Image: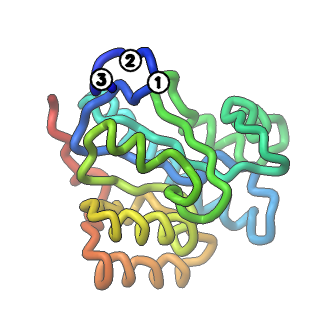
Amino acid sequence: MRRGGSSPNGAAPDRSAIALLVLDMVSDFSFPDGAAMARAALPVARRIGRLADRARKAGVPVIYVNDNLGRWRSDFPGLVRHCRRAGSRGAPILDVLAPQPRDYAILKPRHSGFFATPLATILDYIGAKTLVLTGAATHQCVLFTANDAYVREYRLWIPRDCVASATAAQKRLAARYFHSVLGADMRLSGKIRFPRR
């Protein structure tokens, strides 16, 4: 298989030592604590949006990794449309953080972005060694994805202003784990510098 550039067989076209993951920010937030999570996620979405814009300008791929709601359809654009509909708690978040055409989009069946998804294959084609993890919820899907990234020997950046939980206690619990167990760099998103290729 060819690596980099255009590929006739669907291989990831980007090459980058860093990849930015946006976890579970495409949601209608129709679940217990969904209203609290949506309130916490909106300011985080604005910061992720600014970070993602900087990543794209630096040639760093942005990968949306998201729960699939309801019946499995393997339809990320349909999920975005559902969550942007009028009255959805997720619509304001997608107004500032909708996937762009060049971004990657992966649907996942469980908490970790690696479980039963093509994420590891995509990251291998890209050549990523460092992952910037952002999104929700800090103590669930971000945590499970970070664990799986750690055992795969990725370097982890988890900007503490770009992850959301429904409560401050949940966020603090995960932050302690990220730092003490996974050795994650938790600098603020404004301090992250993407090398230009």
Q: Which residue is mark 1?
A: 10
Disc 3: CA contacts within 10 A as few (<14), some (14-19) or many (>=20)? few
Q: Tag 1: Cα neighbours inside 10 Å, few (<14), some, or many (≥20)?
A: few
Residue at image x 27%, y 51%? Answer: 190
Residue denoted by label 2: 7
Q: Secondary structure at mark 1?
A: loop
Residue located at (24% from left, 51% from top): 129
Q: For the N terminus, which image quadrant?
A: top left
In the image, residue 5 sits, relative to residue 56, either above or below, namely: above
Q: Nearer the viewer, residue 108 or 45?
A: 108
- Give how far apart the Cα atoms at labels 2 and 1 are: 6 Å
Q: Is residue 47 visible?
A: no
* Kind of residue at disc 1: Gly
Q: Give the side of residue 19 with respect to residue 121, left or right.
A: left
Taking the image as shown, residue 158 lies to the left or right of residue 15, namely right
User: Pointer 3: what residue?
Assistant: 2
* Residue pictured at 47% horizontal, 84% vertical: 173
Quadrant including the C terminus = top left
Identified at 46% across, 24% down, the residue is 10
Query: Does dot 2 land on a helix, a strand or a loop?
Result: loop
> What is the total number of numbered labels drawn onto the structure image?
3
In this image, 53 relative to 99: left or right? left
Where residue 18 sits: x, y (%)? 26, 45
Residue 61 seen in this snapshot: yes
Q: CA distance from mark 1 to mark 3?
A: 10 Å
Q: Amino acid at mark 2?
A: Ser
